Amino acid sequence: MSYYKIMGFDKEPFSTNPDPDFLYLSREYDLALTNILIELRLKRGLSALLGDIGTGKTTLSRRLVKELCEREEFVFHTILNPTFENEKEFLSSLIQNFQIPFPQDLASQTVPGMRDAFEKFLLHKNLTDRRTVVLLIDEAQKLSYETLESLRILLNYETNEFKLIQIVLFGQLELYSKLLVISNFYDRIDFKFVLNPLGLEETKEMISFRLRHAGYKDARPLFDNDAVREIYYYAKGYPRGIIRLCHKCLRMLTMSRTATTVTKDMVTEVVQKESDVQWNPAIVQQKKSS
């Protein structure tokens, strides 16, 4: 049985899956999400959210998807792995995923023909159906310069009042330097935001939020203050690291016969065991041979 069932949780509180319902909306997360939604409603065109590995970009993108699903005016598609060999492959993906009627075989079509079909789709959705078309791209640092140029061309599709397609990029920090190379693309970013790691108090609030959301109702804290400080210290405020450490600490707590709360010593022990497994050559070799 999983530790969270043993402890009486309804759900696993510290899963690393990007569940939008478990997103702790810190001040920065809330600010980013609110501004992106404003940009989409105003049809300003291009937004970019950057962050280091483990800062929660993907989970925030899933929360945005959830928000869009609850609003009928949006038509959207999410690209999770934007590795396209050329512009034709990228445009073909858009036509298929937005379910745009196309009478001929896509493989035989030209790039200008695909662009024309997509522009007509955007015009119909925006002007006739009164819908907002949104393209979300996760792992945007993987975008090739050719695909970025294709996105720039799509942003040229506009009326006198608004852009016909709304694009949101979620990417690692390396995306910034890539975008700077294409100045006429970078200049089109209407909203730019960089996610930073959480502070100590936010780390405490995040842990408490996830425990409550998973069904924890006991008045006693499962993590004492020193344990939270230790988790913050080792995870450096990165949500992914916080979640991983909390999961392992709770698992250790379920195996304890006396402890009822995660302590600083438990956190240190978890970190030390993980470090030994990762860096001890004898253990690594033993794991490989088993």
Image: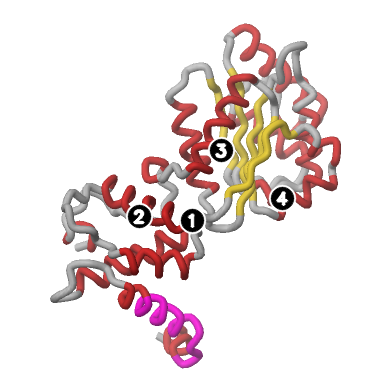
Q: Secondary structure at mark 3?
A: helix
Say what amino acid the circle numbered 2 marks: Ile
Question: Considering only vertical position in the picture, is 171 above or below 259?
Answer: above
Judged by depth in the image, the label closer to the viewer, 4 or 1, is: 1
Q: Which residue is mark 2?
A: 207
Q: Which residue is mark 4?
A: 175
Question: Sequence-wise, which precedes: disc 2 or disc 4?
Answer: 4
Colour scheme? secondary structure
Q: Is residue 212 left or right of residue 93?
A: left
Gap in angstroms between the C-alphas marked 4 and 1: 24 Å
- In the picture, the disc for residue 34 is none
Judged by depth in the image, the label closer to the viewer, 1 or 2, is: 1
Looking at the picture, how far across and down is residue 47, in whole percent?
66, 34
Q: Is residue 150 magenta?
A: no
Query: At 58% across and 9% down in the image, what residue appears?
Result: 129
Say what amino acid the circle numbered 3 marks: Ala
Looking at the picture, how far across and down is residue 1, in whole percent?
19, 63
Query: At 67% across and 34% down in the image, what residue appears?
Result: 191
Q: Is residue 273 magenta?
A: yes
Q: Which residue is mark 1?
A: 199
- In the picture, the disc for residue 32 is 3
Q: Which residues are magenta?
A: 268-282
Question: Sequence-wise, which precedes: disc 1 or disc 3?
Answer: 3
Question: Considering only vertical position in the picture, is 102 above or below 285?
Answer: above
